[in-house]
Image (tube, grey):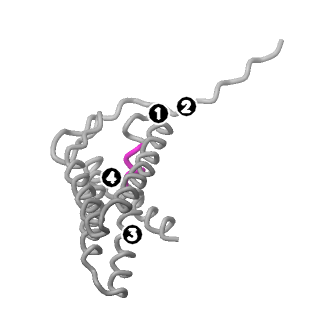
Amino acid sequence: WMNLFARGIGGFMSDWFNSKMGMRGRILIQTVCLLGEGALVLVFANTNQLGSSIIVLVCFSMFVQSAEGTSYGIVPYVNPPATGSIAGIVGAGGNSGAVCFGLGFRQLDYKDAFYIMGGCILGSAVLSLFIKIKGHSGLLFGIDEEPKDTKALEVPEPDEEE
């Protein structure tokens, strides 16, 4: 249920910020979600009571799923003709990250693994400041270009039989 709720909220927030700030808004909310996610991993690593750790874990999970929703809000703008391929690469990146962190938890002390995970997430939030998508402004630099006259795909008319 968390996937349906929080990922949808992330997509909604990405669309809302896009309506107010353009691509800069989408990247801003992506950065905020990643910062919240990374910070809550570090808080979770230092939580000693079961009740508070469950609350932190639920909040962390909401940021994780919201960040995924904001990511898929950006995907169609990266390369519009190849949206499916880009979405596949984004999804595969999540799976490869899960494998890497799984190995980290297997080889390291749990607290150290959580610190590395939180550091990587916070690092990706900082790197998102430098995202620049062609034709759109980044968070720190660039301007939105005027959209070109694009038409929707048209269904071809069937050939008439003689």
Expressed as whole percent of the image width and height from the top left, the position of residue 62 reads 39, 69
Please say if the residues under marks 2 and 4 sit with CB atoms less than 8 Å apart: no
Disc 4 to disc 3, how far (Cα)?
A: 21 Å
Q: Residues within 10 Å of mark 1 (few under 14, many from 20)?
A: few
Magenta stretch bounds: 70-75
Query: What amino acid does circle 1 point to?
Result: Ala
According to the picture, the residue beneath numbered tag 4 turns out to be: 18
Q: Are marks 1 and 2 in contact (CB under 8 Å)?
A: no
Q: Which residue is mark 1?
A: 82
The location of residue 82, given as percent across then percent down, is 47, 33
Residue tagged by mark 2?
Answer: 153
Please, is residue 90 above or below residue 44 in the view?
above
Seen from the viewer's position, the closer of residues 43 and 78 is 43
The answer for how far apart the CA atoms under marks 1 and 2 are is 15 Å
Q: Residue at x 27, y 57 (%)?
A: 121
Which circle's residue, 3 or 1, is located before the other in the chain? 3
